[in-house]
Every structure is written in C-alpha cells, then in structure tokens.
C-alpha cells in the first residue's frame, strides 16, 4: 500500500482585541477532537478557579502567564493538529497594534489567514490593518469569520452588512480569494459542526473550508530558483567524484537534463541527476529539499543560485523594499545592516526612506522618516554584493529578506522586495 502524503496547511489568525481568536482555535481543536483529556481538564479547572462560566477554550493557546492574567494574546503561539484530510499548523497572532511585528512573523509562511470580525462592531481599524498586512504578505487565501453571531441573535442582515463592508475595503487590496463564514466560537456554530441557529447560511463550516482550500498552486511553479545551501563532497572511495549541491527548491520545476545557469558566475550546465534522501528522482519542485548534480565541473558554493537558462532571476545591488520594523531602536537612514536573503548573507546601507505607511487609512506619509518598532515603510537599500531576487508578489522566498543589527546580532526587520 502506498502511503498517502497529507497536505500541510499553515494558517494564521488575525483580528481586533477580544474578537475571539484564541477561543476560536480552542473550539477548533476541541470539536475536531485534537486535544487530550488532561489538557481539557486543566483548562476546565483554571476556568472554574477564575470564576468563569463554562470552559474558557482560549486558555489552550494563551500559554504565557501574562497572557492568561490579562486575557490577551501577546506572543505568536503555534498549534499543530490534523484531520484525515490535512495537517495544520496554526499561528495564533496578537491583535494589538504594538504587536504588529508578531503578526508579520506568524503570517509570513501562511497559506491562509483567518480574519475575525466581531459581529457587534463590524469592520474596525484593526480589521483593515490586519487585512492589509495579509495582502502585503501575499497570503493567498482569506477566510473572514464573522464571530459572536450569538450576540446579534444570529441575524442574517448583520452578516450581509459586514460582508459588503469588508468586500468594499478588500477591493483596494491585493487579495484574490476571500470566503465569509458566520460563526460563534463560544458555542461552536459553523466551526466544526453546521449551525442550526443560522438556517439562512448555505456555505461550509470553517473546518470544511480549511480542509478544502486549494493550496497546491500557491507556490511559483514557473520561475526555477534553487538557492544552494551546501556543497556535498563525501570524499570516500565509493563517491570519489561526487559533487552535489544541496538546497530547497524555491520556485519552478527542475528536471533531469534541464539547461541551467549559476548566479553570479553566469556559467551554464545541465542537470545530470536529482538526488533525495530516498534516492534519485526525475523532477523537483517547491518546497522539496534535494541535491542537484551538474554535468560540468563548475565552481558553485553556498549562496549561489541555480536557475533555468531562459528564465533567470534579477541580479542587482539596489533594492526597493517594503519593510516592517521589529526593533525599539529606529531604522537609521544611511545605517548599515546585515541582510539575509535565501542562503546569502550580505551587508547593506539604507539609501532612502521613501515613505512611512499609515496602515489605518492606507495613506503614505512622505514627511515622517522616523521608522520605529511595528512601523511599515518603503525604503531603498544598496547591498555590498549582488543578490538574485524576484519581486515578493512573484515568489515569497526569493522576494523576502531580513535585516540583522551588526552590533547586537538581533533581527530588526523583515523586508519584501518590490
């Protein structure tokens, strides 16, 4: 019997404070039978001790003491669960403005984002903020959960109004796939089980939507990109002349016999073999980790990129970037930072701060050049050596980079190449 590999879906939750993100994830885990009896008993006991009515399912994800005391989410909590159809990794991200950087971190690898909206309040500033970040991070699928329907008597017109308001706003963003689901995370309506309180809603439950959202084409299968992580030279008698280039396919489909070019040298060759841990294969695609062998002995080292001959990456030292700043110490104009891009490390200087983005009303502020923690801005940098890049909207791997402070070695920002 051939083992069926189940797909992995990474999704993030976003929404305003107290919209019920942690409760929703708790409900999802509980109703899909993905938590152990003792975990449930522990949160039941904690809820009783705090004098809360019923079991507070939010305690399943709010693991930090400060989070439980204040009843808020501070750090990104990752939770894993699986159903027979799919495996899931959930990033429960904070709703507060001062934790924008945490949301960016949690959402950067997500296939889908759950945007929670409180049915009583409708589309608020934080909804717009988080939807914009989801659009900026090119998250392919958005599921808008209109929560707390129990507090508005499960009325259809409330759901329809929020749906219209959000659709009008989302039309200005770079989002293609949006789904709307009316839910009550507290009582489990339309989370895992269909709600009897909303007979007017003909769509799917949240779990069904997560299990069936089409993610196979989320990767870029057109532009071949293979950043080299490691050169494998076993130096044993069995593999005397073996020279393989190991890495993870960042885009496109690489086949045996393909004509390829190596950046930055420009030398060309053909793919002789594609090896994996389980043996040789005919073709490789994202996000597979493989070892490529080339027909010619050319100089290739870590940080180089193997691309197809007729479809090469942009080789440049000047980059236009959207940056989300993570550090309390502000971004310095003409400041020098280390940047990490795919398997390359380089240094850069901040040449220009074009504008700071006001996420609340999507306006550009060209006067304010002070980029502090949690701010998002458009900047221009020059690097010490050429990088092999694609625009972020074309490839989320070759279009992303991080900034590291040379003095403290802290990650201070995340950038998306325009």
Image (tube, rainbow, N blue to C red):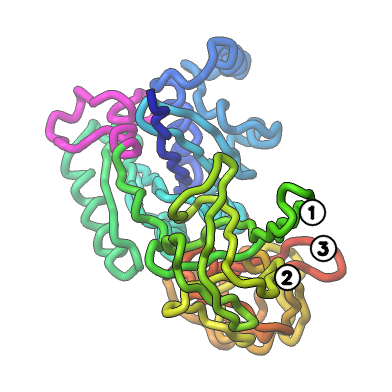
First reached walking from the N terminus: tag 1 or tag 2:
1
Find numbered disc 2 in the image and state the secondary structure of the residue it sits on.
strand
As rendered, which of 227 and 89 lies closer to the eye?
227
Give the residue at mark 1.
235
As rendered, which of 353 and 341 lies closer to the eye?
341
The quadrant in which residue 28 appears is top left
Give the residue at mark 2.
345
Image point 60% across, 78% down: which residue? 263
Find numbered disc 3 in the image and state the secondary structure of the residue it sits on.
loop
Q: Label 3 near label 1: C-beta < 8 Å?
A: no
Q: Which mark is residue 109?
A: none
Please provide percent x and percent y for residue 34. Answer: 47, 21
Image point 68% across, 71% down: which residue? 300
Is 196 within the magenta? yes
Viewer-nearest of labels 2 and 3?
2
As rendered, which of 247 and 8 lies closer to the eye?
247
Find numbered disc 1 in the image and state the secondary structure of the residue it sits on.
loop
Q: Label 2 near label 1: C-beta < 8 Å?
A: no
Is 16 on the left-hand or right-hand side of 325?
left
Does 323 appear above or below 5? below
Viewer-nearest of labels 1 and 2?
1
């Amino acid at each position: 019997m051939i083992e069926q590999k189940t797909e992995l879906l990474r999704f993030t939750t976003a929404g305003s404070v107290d919209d019920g993100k942690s409760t929703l994830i708790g409900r999802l885990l509980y109703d899909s039978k993905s938590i152990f009896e003792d975990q449930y008993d522990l949160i039941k006991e904690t809820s009783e001790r705090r004098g809360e009515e019923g079991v507070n399912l939010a305690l399943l994800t709010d693991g930090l003491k400060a989070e439980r005391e204040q009843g808020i989410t501070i750090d990104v909590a990752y939770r894993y669960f699986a159903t027979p159809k799919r495996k899931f990794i959930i990033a429960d991200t904070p709703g507060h403005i001062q934790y924008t950087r945490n949301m960016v971190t949690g959402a950067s690898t997500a296939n889908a984002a759950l945007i929670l909206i409180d049915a009583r309040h409708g589309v608020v500033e934080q909804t717009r903020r988080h939807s914009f970040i989801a659009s900026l991070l090119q998250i392919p699928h958005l599921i808008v959960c209109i929560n707390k329907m129990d507090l508005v008597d499960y009325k259809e017109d409330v759901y329809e109004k929020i749906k219209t308001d959000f659709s009008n706003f989302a039309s200005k963003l770079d989002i293609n796939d949006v789904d709307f689901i009316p839910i009550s995370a507290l009582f489990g309506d339309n989370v895992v089980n269909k709600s009897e309180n909303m007979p007017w809603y003909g769509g799917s439950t949240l779990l069904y939507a997560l299990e069936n959202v089409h993610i196979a084409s989320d990767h870029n299968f057109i532009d071949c990109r293979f950043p080299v992580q490691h050169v494998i030279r076993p130096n044993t008698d069995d593999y005397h002349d073996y020279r393989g280039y190991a890495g993870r396919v960042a885009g496109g489909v690489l086949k045996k016999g393909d004509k390829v070019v190596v950046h930055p040298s420009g030398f060309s060759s053909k793919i002789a073999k594609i090896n994996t841990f389980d043996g040789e294969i005919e073709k490789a695609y994202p996000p597979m980790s493989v070892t490529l062998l080339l027909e010619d002995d050319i100089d290739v080292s870590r940080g180089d990129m193997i691309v197809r001959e007729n479809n090469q990456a942009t080789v440049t030292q000047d980059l236009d970037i959207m940056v989300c700043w993570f550090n309390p110490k502000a971004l310095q104009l003409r400041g020098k930072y280390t940047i990490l891009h795919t398997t390359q490390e380089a240094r850069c200087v901040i040449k220009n701060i074009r504008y700071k983005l006001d996420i609340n009303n999507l306006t550009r502020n060209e006067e304010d050049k002070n980029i502090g923690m949690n701010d998002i801005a458009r900047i221009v940098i020059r690097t010490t050596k050429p990088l092999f890049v694609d625009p972020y909207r074309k490839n989320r791997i070759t279009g992303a980079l991080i900034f590291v402070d040379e003095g403290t070695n802290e990650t201070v920002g995340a950038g998306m190449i325009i």
